[in-house]
Image (cartoon, rainbow, N blue to C red):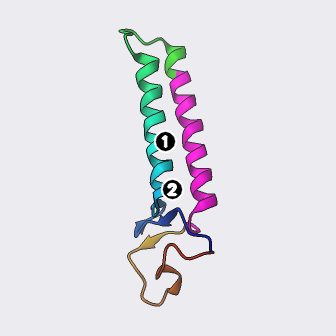
Amino acid sequence: MKRYWFKRKLFGWGWQPATWEGWLVFLAYIVIALGNLFFRYAGSVSEDEQSIYRFLFDTIILTIILILITVRTGEKPRWQWGKRIEDPEDSDPTAPR
């Protein structure tokens, strides 16, 4: 039985971690993003333009990877404005697709 790592957010569009695997992916994203920021600018007083562009490029690539993982291991995304009573799909976010 396949479980969702990420479930739809209750309000808005997007995902949130639903299992330990989802939380691990999200934590890895945060650690890598902060590590990229820290190691790129650690000890440097002045940031050159190329370094800023490289940081932005790395962050965009990392975010695309996170989105691809959530699309592959999460519920189908859609806009939500709270929980709909008649929607049986929302009853169990870890149910298989």
Identify the image quadrant of residue 11.
Answer: bottom left
Say if the magenta span includes residue 63.
Answer: yes
Q: Chief secondary structure of the magenta span?
A: helix
Q: Is residue 3 left or right of residue 47?
A: right
Q: Is residue 79 magenta?
A: no
Which span of residues is magenta-colored?
A: 53-77
**Regarding mark 2 in the picture, which secondary structure is present there?**
helix
Q: Using the image as rendered, state which of residue 2 and residue 87 is in the foreground.
A: 2
Of the numbered discs 1 and 2, the one sitting upstream in the chain is 2
> Which is nearer the eye, 97 or 49?
97
- The label shown at residue 21 is 2
Label at residue 29: 1
Local SS, label 1: helix
- Quadrant where the C terminus sits is bottom right
Rendering coords of residue 91 (x, y %): 46, 82
- Three-letter amino acid code at disc 2? Glu
Q: Residue at x 55, y 76 (%)?
A: 95
Among all residues in the image, which is located at the extreme bottom? Answer: 86
Q: Residue at x 43, y 36 (%)?
A: 31
Q: Identify the residue shown where x is 40% and y is 23%.
A: 38
How far apart are the alpha carbons under marks 1 and 2? 12 Å
Task: Work out whether residue 57 or residue 21 is closer to the camera in this orientation and state it.
Answer: 21
Image position of 95 with respect to 23: above or below: below
Q: Is residue 3 left or right of residue 17?
A: right
Residue at the location (48% across, 60% down)? 15
